[in-house]
Image: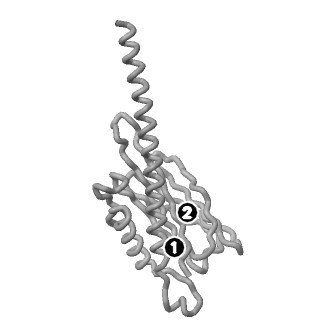
Amino acid sequence: MGINLLSISTLLFFLLIGLFVVDTDLAMQKKQEVKTLLELANHHASFAVDPVLKTEGVIDLIEEEALIRFAERMRENGSYLMEAASFIPAANSVTTDPIPFVRHYIDFRSWRQDWELHLRYDGSALAVERINPGARNPDGGRLRILVTTKQGEVLQLAPKTMVGPSHVVVAYVDERPFLSTLPGHAFPVVSVEEVKR
């Protein structure tokens, strides 16, 4: 009787570890999929160049058109619909919960300057808290993005070096686990895309 109870306990323990590993693997896959979707959508958005200024040699983004193009690609590639500042998933989307996002455009006058974007996630929305300018760099400014979570933890994303005017999109994935006994998954994802010439 004692051996059977020990065997069952051991089996349950290894089953729980297996579920945790599978859940973590799913979270990593979702992070990569969302990053890919953001990159593809942002690439499409970065073609929304002002044609009049382009004839004068100035590369500048039409932001309204860029947002429309971004939303089109998120719908086409991931079945997400944009509502206000969130992407709402469909039944076949890679995530199950809405993905709040913010976007920021660093134009042709500012891309050689360092920028620090401070964002805050409150559990449902992602918002820009402040934007701090830094030093000028002739080769391109460095972009630092910091996200304060609803628990007050500050997440610092890997810095990016800009090579021209840039469209920046940061999304925050906050997903329920597939089993209620496991912790949820929450992580920011960023895409920085140079405006196309």
Q: Is residue 22 above or below residue 122?
A: above
Q: Earlier in the sequence, mark 2 or mark 1?
A: 1
Crowdedness near tag 2: few (<14), some (14–19) or many (≥20) residues, C-alpha within 10 Å: some
Describe residue 119's horizontal placement relative to residue 67 as left or right. Answer: right
| Residue 1 position within the rendered picture, expressed as x and y whole percent measured from the top left | 34, 6
Q: Is residue 12 above or below residue 150?
A: above
Q: In x, y percent, where is residue 142?
A: 64, 66
Q: x%, y% of residue 163?
A: 63, 73
- Give the quadrant of residue 181: top left
Q: Residues within 10 Å of mark 1 (few under 14, many from 20)?
A: many
C-beta proximity under 8 Å, tags 2 and 1: no
Question: Disc 2 or disc 1, which is closer to the eye?
Answer: 1
Q: Quadrant of residue 171?
A: bottom left
Q: As drawn, which residue projects farthest toward the right?
A: 138
Q: Which residue is rendered at x = 34% and y = 66% of the image?
A: 82
At label 2, the amino acid type is Leu
Q: Residue at x 54, y 50 (%)?
A: 154
Q: Residue furthest left?
A: 91
Label 2, label 1: how many angstroms apart (C-alpha)?
11 Å
Q: Nearer the viewer, residue 189 or 127?
A: 189
Q: Which residue is mark 1?
A: 105
Q: Looking at the picture, how far across and down is residue 15, in whole percent?
A: 40, 28
Secondary structure at badge 2 equals strand
User: Residue beneath label 2, please?
Assistant: 117
Location of residue 7 with respect to 102 vertically, above or below: above
Seen at 36% across and 53% down, the residue is: 95
Q: Vertical placement of 108 versus 51: above or below?
A: above
Question: Quadrant location of the C terminus?
Answer: bottom right
